[in-house]
Amino acid sequence: MMEVKGKKISVIGAARSGIGAAKLIKKLGGIPFVSDFSPKEKLKESLNQLEKENINYEFGGHSDRVYDSAWMIISPGVPNDSAVLNNARGKGIKLISEIEFAYHYCKGKIIAVTGTNGKTTTTSLCGHVFNTCGYKTHVAGNIGLAFSEIVLDVKEGEFVSLEVSSFQLDLIENFKPDTALILNITPDHLNRYENSLQKYSESKQRIYENQDEKDYLVLNKDNQAVIKYLVDHKSKSFFFSLNELQNNGCFYSEGNVIFKLNGKETFRCLRNDIKIRGEHNLANAMAVICAAKAYNLDNEGIIKGLQTFESVEHRLELVREIDGVKYVNDSKATNVDSVWYAIKSFDEPILLILGGQDKGNDYQQIKPLVLQKVKKIYAIGSSAEKVYNFFNQDVKVEVVKSMEEAVKSSSKEAKSGDVVLLSPACASFDMFNNYEHRGKVFKEAVNNLK
């Protein structure tokens, strides 16, 4: 356990995890100081929480006060090579991530979920299945509440289903989940990793570096980067696959989802038992089944959990159906790979709202699917021109100035049986505070339709 009482500790970044870390420091008797480069206007909710907790802070830049600290806790949004972190390293100040900090105070078992896509859905589904089977499970991380926010509430014998990003794993030392899930690794955030898929993958693979023989590692057998960059580990491995039979893990065969342990079948359910739609969510559910069977959870309870789980907000979320037209919020699709899975999830014709703050997107990956399934694209945000130029020769594309305009325009053109899908493939920060804000604006616009 880290000794915090009486120590000055700087927290860099005032978003969800930074606020959670600062609160935990204070509860443990430490002296937190929160510093964020963004102006106050962008962080009103954080400002309110800090003032309510009487925690000292600064916004709009990092002063020398941040270096008057025993160590620094770094939020995932802060680049690893930023000046404030490099200066701290030069002064010999230890840097750790918020999940590393919270880990030292966790009395329960941790199921940590990482991957490029599907983390939020899988983390939520895992918590739901474990709770349905009678095991008290807290859901935290990059979803809902920060790990620091809930860690002192976790009792022995309970579980934490924890969403973990590569940015958080970059600054771990002792963090050791009892079960680690790597869902997939595809190109994303490569600007943080020298445009190297290998470096990005190596960051994800750190999730199991401290595991031992008592721990479990769940891996996607179908994902090339997961397998290619896998390193030696002591934990017991389970694989899941949509394409191949597994003797230690979960696989799909002729409408059935089957789990085997040492070649012996110990679980089976129907594909239709898994309520969330899409091939990618079938894979996510298989990862959760592996985690559940690692703890020998009751089969009936697992199936009930799969049957009763609703999709998470902003992830292929059905907002409303009007005159046979479904409006679906997939605002969390912030990369091209996510959009591929989203389009693949529907048999109906799609009117697609696409665009935002571009991260170097290559739309070639989704072009065949778009040509096959998308009737029209509504290009939005700072990347609208790029989207228009790429698709305009092959698909109808309309550039729109706002989310409200995209929803109104699509509602006029959509026919019964169509899907209006917000799946932007981009970050949200050109027009919105975050992907949640973008999704809420979409939902408000849909709910305002007559």
Image: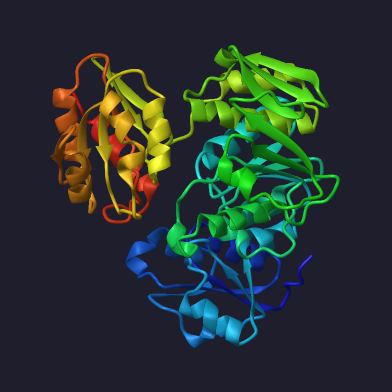
Asked where in the image residue 175 lies, by quadrant, the reply is: bottom right
Instruction: Establish if 106 lies above or below 137.
Output: below
**Residue 354 visible in rendering:** yes
Q: Nearer the viewer, residue 225 or 57?
A: 225
Question: On the rendered structure, is 183 left or right of 61?
Answer: right
Q: Nearer the viewer, residue 111 or 13?
A: 111
Q: Position of residue 14 (x, y in %)?
A: 48, 65
Q: Position of residue 262 (x, y in %)?
A: 83, 27
Q: Position of residue 330 (x, y in %)?
A: 38, 36
**Residue 162 visible in rendering:** no
Instruction: Establish if 70 lies above or below 331.
Output: below
* Colouring scheme applied when the structure was drawn: rainbow
Q: Tell how many labels.
A: 0
Question: On the rendered structure, is 286 left or right of 406?
Answer: right
Q: Nearer the viewer, residue 421 or 148?
A: 421
Residue drawn at the location 66% of the way across and 15% of the way down: 269
Asked where in the image residue 413 lies, by quadrant, the reply is: top left
Asked where in the image residue 62 lies, by quadrant, the reply is: bottom left
Q: Quadrant of the C terminus?
A: top left
Q: Quadrant of the N terminus?
A: bottom right
Q: Position of residue 34 (x, y in %)?
A: 52, 72
Instruction: Establish if 7 lies above or below 397.
Output: below
Question: On the rendered structure, is 89 left or right of 104?
Answer: left
